[in-house]
Image: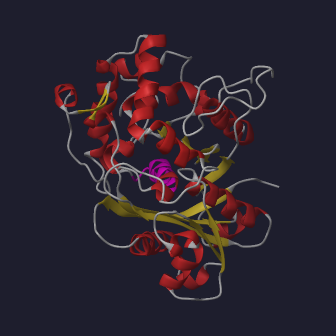
Amino acid sequence: MSADVAVLGAGMHPWGKWGRGFVTYGRAAARAALADAGLEWTDVDSVVGAGTVRAGYPGHVAGAAFAQALGWQGARVTTVYAACASGAQAIAAARAQILAGLAEVVLVVGADAAPKGFFAPAGGERPDDPDWLRFRVLGATNPAYFALYARRRMAVYGDTLEDFARVKVKNAAAGALNPRARYRRAVTAGEVAASAVVADPLRLLDICATSDGGAALVLSSMDFARSRGAGRPVRVRAVSTVTPVYPRTTLDLPDIATDSAPAGTRPPAPFRASIARAAYEEAGIGPEDLSLAEVYDLSTALELEWYEDIGLCGPGEGAKLVREGVTALGGRVPVNPSGGLASFGEAVPAQAIAQVCELTWQLRGTAGGRQVPGARAGITANQGLFGHGSAVVALR
């Protein structure tokens, strides 16, 4: 049996700070995806919602919240939560339902109304929550550990502040071409260097903001797609949601404890690299087959790590790719042609879905001024707190 499912529709609510509830953004994204698919809401057999713990009670039952907002019509509902990997987990759940024959058409929706400033755990005493402990024991906001990764790259590989700035310049140039992005202005390396220090060595323009936004996909069986005249739809070929393997040789917040198996053998690949490796293995392709990638640029320095983790280059060689323009629009393998989180900000349950929306438009050849010529294969990659892997391979 083919593992492919068709992407019939992709839709987004533009990112920004709009002052409304997450259901509003999700409903708008869902309607846009249905219109893109040429389907009615009543054609949907199942809704999978990516949840957020910040949106109040409905955020924990996002599938039902979106179904109700669109109008109850009897579809089954599912809600998943996996921090920043929630969207990919939602895609995985939808794909599984289709391949199992439980549904022909599934709507996947994620949306968020994020707070201003740094993300922080909800209140209360939760000593079993590693994220709560990170704030209580270390006082480490997200930019603090972004900066630790940046310092590690500088110490181990010789990356420079100029290398980090090149990533922002590249992504801002792509985001300026994306009507759905929050930040649509090109920036210079000088502007990055002149922006305020947030967590040394990272400046304000090195890190992503928090945002409101929504994204949605309409997925279907290949048979259904063909019955609707979609002869060559974009296909989701693989979804990776792997977890880490002990021992972990690089500390990865919010985990602040030692490994549970310190005497174990070294794992074959670091956690982030294992995410992409599993996706390639399932899809039957390798990094050499990629036309583009969408990766999780929480910071400029972290994007350079993803180049290595998705196999575009070896360890420590990420900066070389950005210096040579390999990952820019017009380069050999553009990374974050959407503009990435640098241009959108974090709307946590939506962002992994938004990455697949971008792959869809690129693979269709409808991405406008940011189009990657002849795009045929793409991968998304991000990581959710608490050991959630996230990668999706899409093909045309």
Res. 11 visible in picture = no
Q: Is residue 157 magenta?
A: no
Q: State which quadrant residue 41 falls in.
A: bottom right
Location of residue 208 in the rendering, given as x and y in whole percent from the top left corner: 35, 43
Q: In this rendering, is residue 299 above or below 130? A: above
Q: Residue at 32% x, 51% y: name it.
A: 117
Q: In this rendering, is residue 341 above or below 190? A: below
Q: In this rendering, is residue 201 above or below 96? A: above
Location of residue 239 in the rendering, given as x and y in whole percent from the top left corner: 66, 48
Res. 185 visible in picture = yes
Residue sitting nearer the eye, 120 or 385:
120
Residue sitting nearer the eye, 208 or 379:
208
Q: Is residue 361 magenta?
A: yes
Image quadrant where one finds the N terminus: bottom right
Location of residue 264 in the rendering, given as x and y in whole percent from the top left corner: 81, 22
Magenta stretch secondary structure, dominant: helix
Q: State which quadrant residue 340 falls in.
A: top left
Q: Is residue 50 left or right of residue 184?
A: right
Residue sitting nearer the eye, 243 or 199:
199
Residue sitting nearer the eye, 395 or 107:
107
Q: Is residue 225 left or right of residue 182?
A: right
Q: Which residues are magenta?
A: 353-366
Q: Residue at 36% x, 49% y: name it.
A: 345
Q: Residue at 22% x, 30% y: name it.
A: 192
Q: Residue at 42% x, 70% y: name it.
A: 22
Location of residue 248 in the rendering, given as x and y in whole percent from the top left corner: 68, 27
